[in-house]
Image: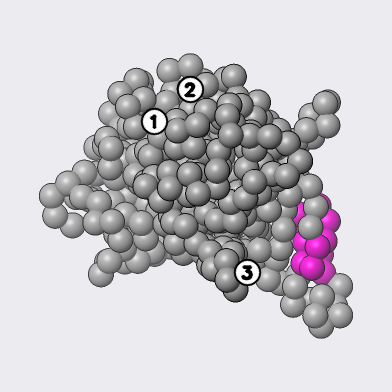
Amino acid sequence: MGSGYHVAVVGATGAVGQEMLAVLQKRRFPVRTLTLLASPRSKGKRLRYGEEQLAVEVLTKDAFKGVEIALFSAGGSRAKEFAPAAVSAGAVVVDNSSAFRMEAGVPLVVPEINPETIRQHQGIIANPNCSTIAMVVPLYPLHKAFGVKRVVVCTYQAASGAGAAAMEELKAETLAQLEGRPYQRTIFPQQYAFNLFPHNSPLLEDGYCEEEVKMVRETHKIMGDSSIRINATCVRVPVLRAHSEALNIEFQREVAPAAAYDVLRRAPGIEIHEDRAANRWATPVDGSGQDPVLVGRIRTDRSQPNTLDLWLVSDQLLKGAALNAVQIAELL
């Protein structure tokens, strides 16, 4: 494959893992050797990378010999089990799970916001939650410009956040509903096709779910400011791969929508996507397959001072996972 690094993709057959392969190729990441790792049931499966067909190998603690960068997307339990072995073998791990995000000494990185924290790594760098990434990409430049006091966010999250099997389940259940057939779900706890429900991550005693708490804690760590008050309501919607979010942002002073637009037009990783004359705003269809976070519909909150509303859409598999991980690897 030429000069470059020995890269391993852990969880290569999953939705994010396959997207990582596509992003590595698209961004022409300098790959000398590529090792694809997954569970035993995927052994021998072949995945395309450029002109090559590479065989998937079994993930073991001895699979990281010579690996310099290991991109993990295999879930929290496997990350805890195998990431230390990768580090011991000399690799730097970029992990997409929640296993290490809040640990001291583990940078939690969005390259547009806090790339300098990568220098603090001790072998593991954490990729934030997909919903958190989508929110902080526009929130951070607004915070730097105007000072954010409080954020109320409602998310509309796609099936891809639960993996490739969840995306297939949504397709199959939708077809079954259209044909009037019964359908036995294995991924989601209740009907997903033509339906929505509060996020199905574990519920905590105070009534919030883990996904909502992640958005609060991770945002504080990434932005380096725990004084920002954040309240999240996370919802699963029957969309395949792009998350949407509605943000209500209170600032330290009055901010005109035009000023917010001006800041966001200059900010990295963002595309203003709207057609006000036609009353058209970014949708998950627009965001699917797109690298930037699509932002628009910025307006003044009529109910309280110094507050704006904002709408965004972000591809969960790209900026929410694979793209952000590869951008971290590029910084390395």
Q: Is residue 269 above or below residue 167?
A: above
Q: Inspect the image, locate mark 2, and give the three-letter code of the amino acid beneath it.
A: Gly
Query: Which residue bears the numbered disc 3?
Result: 279
Q: CA distance from mark 2 to mark 1?
A: 9 Å
Q: Name the kind of residue labelled 1 in the image.
A: Asn
| Image quadrant where residue 190 sits | bottom right
Spatial separation of the CA atoms under disc 3 and disc 2? 36 Å
Determine whether the residue tagged by mark 2 lies in a helix, strand or loop: loop
Residue carrying label 1: 114
Front residue of this view, candidates 305 and 188 = 305
Q: Residue at x 50, y 49 (%)?
A: 258
Q: Is residue 203 left or right of residue 48?
A: right
Residue 326 vertical position relative to residue 190 in the rendered view, above or below: above
In reply to whether residue 141 is colored magenta, the answer given is no
Question: What span is colored magenta in the figure?
Answer: 183-195
Residue 124: percent from the left, percent from the top? Answer: 40, 28
The answer to whether residue 187 is magenta is yes
State yes or no: discs 2 and 1 in contact (Cβ < 8 Å): yes
Does any portion of residue 233 appear in the rendered image?
yes
Q: Residue at the location (79% across, 47% down)?
A: 198
Rendered residue at 52%/28% (across/down): 147
- Disc 3 versus disc 2: nearer the observer: 3
Please state, as top left, top right, bottom left or bottom right, where the C terminus lies in the image: top left
Task: State which quadrant residue 219 falls in.
Answer: top right
Q: Residues within 10 Å of mark 3 (few under 14, many from 20)?
A: few
Q: Is residue 148 left or right of residue 91?
A: right
Specify the principal SS of the magenta part.
loop
Residue 308: x percent and y percent?
62, 42
State the residue position of label 2: 224
Specify whether 60 is left or right of 190: left
Where disc 3 sits, the SS reads loop
- Asked whether, in this view, residue 93 is left or right of residue 287, the answer is left
